[in-house]
């Protein structure tokens, strides 16, 4: 999931309702889940294709999701700050386990009392591709489609990085991007994590962005229209406002 090789299922859990012991899942999105990681017979693990039934089924039950959320809240309370928490399902007993927790690096560093807002001032006539929005910002520029890290030298400052997926080796390019678009990955994949830390708009899990977009094409990448991020044709007008509540 973090590696961005799979588009996972997503759930949103409302903490106040969870604390009251009531149904707390307020939204869910089913991902394509084309692959999964399993134990190898001789030891270690391997990635295999999922079945059609697995792709069309939720990867966890509502009860499991709420149990994970309860554990996450306990971890946050213990450390007294927002946490980035990873979990896994054991291949032997089928149970869910927390495998890592580290301090969250974006929300915890935001300016207190300052609200930043992005808004499209004109509507794009053509949506070229869409996926899961990361953050709420808007960016624009010329598309540069990279198939591997070896093409790093071809990437220019402010271009829109379009790739199948990214990994840590891509960070030098991502720091120069005006926006990031990937075919694969969910809101907790590497591209999404780095985009949040850098404050760069990103849309992940588009499926076919590398096919639908063209090198040199001028586009606007909008994450300011809800959970779904849209890539519009052309350099559209948008505005950024900042309100200090202090």
Image (cartoon, helix red, strand yellow):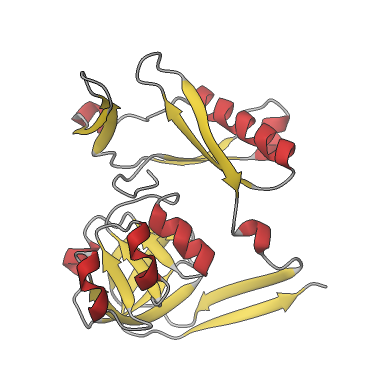
Looking at the rendered image, the quarter that the C terminus falls into is bottom right
Q: Nearer the viewer, residue 177 or 30?
A: 177
Looking at the rendered image, the quarter that the N terminus falls into is top left
Which of the 4 image quadrants contains residue 165?
bottom left
Going by the image, does 145 lie left or right of 2?
Answer: left
Please tell me which residue is depicted at 71% across the width and 77% down the height of the picture. 243
Please tell me which residue is depicted at 74% across the width and 43% down the height of the picture. 80
Q: Is residue 208 above or below residue 87?
A: below
- x, y (%) of residue 160? 33, 76
Q: How many marks?
A: 0
Please tell me which residue is depicted at 29% across the width and 53% down the height of the picture. 184
Q: Nearer the viewer, residue 28 or 114?
A: 114
Q: Is residue 7 above or below residue 57?
A: below
Q: Is residue 29 above or below residue 245?
A: above
Which of the 4 image quadrants contains residue 149?
bottom left
Which of the 4 image quadrants contains residue 228?
bottom left
Task: State whether residue 128 appears in this view.
Answer: no
Q: Nearer the viewer, residue 124 or 142?
A: 142
Going by the image, does 23 lie left or right of 180?
Answer: right
Please tell me which residue is depicted at 44% across the width and 51% down the height of the picture. 187
């Amino acid at each position: 999931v973090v590696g961005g090789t799979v588009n996972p299922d997503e759930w949103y859990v409302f903490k106040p309702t969870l604390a009251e012991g009531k149904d707390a899942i307020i939204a869910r999105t089913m991902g394509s889940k084309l692959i999964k990681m399993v134990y190898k017979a001789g030891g270690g693990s391997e990635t295999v294709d999922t079945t059609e039934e697995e792709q069309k089924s939720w990867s966890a039950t509502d009860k499991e999701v709420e149990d994970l959320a309860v554990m996450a809240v306990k971890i946050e309370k213990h450390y007294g700050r927002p946490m980035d928490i990873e979990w896994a399902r054991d291949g032997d007993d089928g149970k869910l386990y927390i495998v890592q927790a580290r301090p969250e690096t974006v929300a915890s560093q935001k300016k207190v009392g300052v609200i930043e807002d992005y808004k499209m001032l004109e509507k794009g006539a053509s949506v070229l591709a869409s996926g899961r929005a990361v953050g709420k910002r808007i960016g624009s520029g010329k598309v540069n489609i990279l198939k591997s890290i070896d093409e790093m030298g071809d990437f220019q400052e402010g271009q829109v990085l379009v790739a199948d997926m990214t990994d840590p080796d891509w960070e030098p390019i991502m720091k120069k991007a005006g926006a990031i678009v990937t075919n694969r990955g969910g809101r907790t994949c590497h591209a999404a994590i780095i985009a949040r830390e850098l404050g760069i708009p990103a849309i992940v899990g588009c499926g076919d962005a590398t096919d639908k977009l063209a090198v040199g094409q001028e586009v606007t990448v909008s994450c300011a229209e809800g959970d779904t991020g849209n890539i519009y044709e052309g350099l559209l007008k948008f505005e950024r406002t900042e309100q200090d509540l202090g």
